[in-house]
Amino acid sequence: MSLSMKTTAAKAEAPARDEARDGGFVWLFIRAVNGLSLICGILAAIGIAVAVALVCQLVFVRYVLNASTVWQTEVVIYLMIGATLLGAPYVQRARGHVNVDLLPIYLRGRARFVLYYLCLLLAMVVCLIVAYYGFEMALEAYVYNWRSPSVWGAALWPSYSAIPIGFFVWFLQLLADFLAVATGRDKPFGIDDEEDATDRALRKEH
Amino acid sequence: MDPLMLGALVGIITTLILFCGMSIGIGLLLVSIGFLALFDGLSSLSLVPELFFGKLDSFAMLSIPMFILMGAAVASSRAGGDLYSALDRWMTRVPGGLVISNLGACALFSALSGSSPATCAAIGKMGIPAMRERGFPDSVAAGSIAAGGTLGILIPPSVTMIVYGIATETSIGRLFLAGLVPGLMLTGLFMAWSLFSTWRQGRATAALIPVSYTWRQRFEVLPRVLPFLLIVAAVLYALYGGIATPSETAAVGALACLLTAVVIYRMWQPSKLWGILRDSTRESVMILIIVGGAGVFSYMLSSLYITQAIANSIIAMELNPWLLMLFINLFLLVCGFFLPPVAVIVMAAPILLPVITSAGFDPYWFAVILTINMEIGLISPPVGLNLYVINGIAPEIRLQTILLGSLPYVGCMVVAIILLCLFPGIATWLPNMVMGAAT
Amino acid sequence: SPAMAERLRVSHQWSTNDVRHKIVEIVAEEVKNADVGLELQIFPNASLFKPNDQWTPLTRGQLEMAVLPLAYAAGRHPEFNLTLMPALVKNHEHAARLNNSEFMEEIEKIMNDGGVVTLVRGWLAGGFAAKNKCIVKPEDVQGMQTRAAGRAFEEMLAAAGASISSMPSSEIYSGMQTGVLDAVNTSSSSFVSYRLYEQVKCYTPPGDYALWFMYQPLVMSKRSWDSLNDEQREALRAGAAKAEAYYAEEAAREDNEAIDVYRNAGVEIAMMDAQAYEAWRELAAASSYKAFVASTPNGQKLLDLALSVD
Ligand code: NA
Ligand code: NA
């Protein structure tokens, strides 16, 4: 998502193409990854909803019942982190990660394609690096039984796992976006050559 | 390499990467990973996921998705239109009532929703046609809504302020209070300019004629908007009274706004509720990913001693504090032209805060200055978010008119910054009175 | 020469006025004067790592040094919970004896195996403060909303009938102000720096009998330590010895300073006597000690070792 399209992120889905026409493995892969990202997004939304409910429960227990609140704080924080990381690939799919799209709009034709591929490749490298070390971190937490330092002493590996899972699915989604442009199913940065930024804002708004 | 040189290199490369169109969170991670691998060794890369996780691992951070959800519940209902009608019907006796009530509705709605584009869209859809119809010039109709929408990040609750509070370890409740009076002052300045501009363009006679409503018409809109106003009042009271922490307040506020939307606006269909949840999840994820990436980025700056070197060298220059403040404002302004407020704050606040405090400025006052700079970015090219929204909802007004019409409101914001510099008490008086002097 | 000096980054979470910053400065000064090609670069106010995130990078050599409340790493090594255990340390003299005991040797061994070595040892004491009445005996906390510093203290206070609210220390003041919290248990220096004397009626400082002691050593990554030459290690040891003496002296002085601050603010000062202390200790044995032994392999042996120090 570009800054100038922020409000419309909610409506901007990855454009539907005449997919069935050319079928094949690439098409299946893109479909599968989009589905996976959607599942992650739904889980993220549920995570946030549950976090809201739990904080309200915490408020009730602490202020109304005047009783101990031991586990709520940690659970809601881990829910929020999990939702953020699982939500990342979904937001990628919906072009919801904000970027500065001045150069992409300025460039035309081949140059814009090259820039797009370069950005996606670098982003994929970043996601793989974070996912790899995140996997190491989650594994270490599992093997050595790392726990949070509170009375509740929650095991850390489940919440740590959100990092490798979120970033790996994000990598897959970037790859799917890459393939979608490479096979002509989508335009780089989602920009149509005929439009300028204003037209785009208009189109999205209506 | 000298930390200052290294800092300049980081600055240039970050700018290049972000201008290439990479998403901000990933771009920050990319720069951090590159510099950590080069200067701290490849082994430091295993820290990246830990830093990312650690940055988000905070109860205060939770108030971001909660307030966003609260705003989404308000924004997705028809509360904006009702708020606008209510103010319009109640303010008609005031000269120039329509633009006054539009700006008032912007201030209230942006306080509720916290989102400046949502405010522009919600109030502008009804407000802009109405203002044009009653004879207000296009420049005022478009500019006042574009500017009014930016108030949401200054008038509490404000996600921008929460991010600042977490980045600088300052009290979120106190930050919210600090933004209140300047937010109202800015609203007042916007109103004053709108009326002056209308009068100067010779439209006063048409625009200032009051339209009358019956008392029945006035009262029938109240039940729809009062609950939201009560919720916001309760949220602010709970925060400033220190009755609950920001995250607790925000969660209860979110639940209350959702219930209000369900009860008053009949938004009980699962698809509508899912829409609210989906929109707010997207917005939260987008912001929190930037926050996590910026956490890794600021570790990189700190570990390579860049943060400290920059702060030390600025302090060593012994600039006149007001000259320093001028440079900082220009820097923030340029950042705000291109980047969204949250990204500017998470990157700049940790570096600037030690400089600001050592020059004797109040961190809460500075938060207000910073936020107004970010507001300017929202209505100025090249990436003025609100301008595009206005263009979208009022296609009959030319983009050039929107741009030029917004410019005087940028002037109002600059005036507000100057007033805040002359009278810092505008920002610090209320928090000091309610919460006692800052430590 | 300083241009070629190898830099050791030291992370901690306190301000530059804090005693824990001063001890690092002492070591830094000593190492600089020794001219052994080492330079300590201090990152105060958690400006490099968050307090709870320091242990892992230390073990891997990604962070060279830190002033670290060891109990923060108890999620990795549950044995460290003993370094923040109620009624285990009675007073500062007792803390000094504990430092040179077999118990601390065992703790040090666990740290070394994890990849961390200790340079400067030190304990800081703390007490209780409450809004409406004095906390001396376990019965006093019954029904109070309490914020405790440390897992073992939460367990003990819960056993005494208090409600536990876990919240960051930065929110204690407003919690007290609004009545969300009735009582707080934290360190002497936090009692002063958070200005809780404006909110409480009664303060129970650490005196001859203190419940709350926390081990907060200056530690170093073993990987970094192993990479130093003998000369550099000697310089660090010399600085550490000097800092350790200062740390012990200052720790006791801070307790007295807190008492003065609270007394001057008109807060009532209550002292714990032998009888009350014993009651707390019995309660701790039935709650915190028990939970510790149950959740820590070899926990009983370590606890006995600690309790055997007279
Ligand atoms: Na707001
Ligand atoms: Na802009």
Image: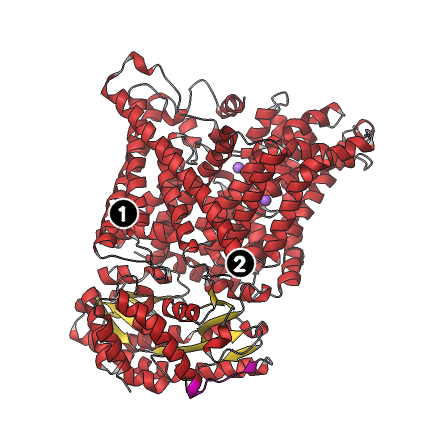
Give the chain of mark 1.
Answer: A
- Residue at the image point whose x is 42% and y is 59% from the top: A70
Q: Nearer the viewer, residue B191 or B267?
A: B267
Tag 1: amino acid: Gly
- Helix, strand or loop at mark 2: loop
Tag 2: amino acid: Leu
- Mark 2 or mark 1: which comes first in sequence? 2
Decide if residue A187 is on the left or right side of residue B249: left
- Residue at the image point whose x is 28% and y is 81% from the top: C307
Q: Are discs 2 and 1 located on one and the same chain?
A: yes
- Residue at the image point whose x is 37% and y is 75% from the top: C284
Q: Which mark is residue A65?
A: 2
Q: Is residue A161 above or below residue A151?
A: above
The answer to whether marks 2 and 1 mark residues whose Cβ atoms lie closer than 8 Å is: no
Extent of the magenta region: C268-275
Decide if residue B256 is on the left or right side of residue A150: right
Circle 2 residues within 10 Å: few <14, some 14–19, many ≥20? few
Q: Residue A178, position in %: x, y?
A: 30, 27
The image quadrant that residue A33 belongs to is: top left
Q: How many marks?
A: 2
Report the residue marked by disc 1. A134
Q: Nearer the viewer, residue B143 or C14?
A: C14
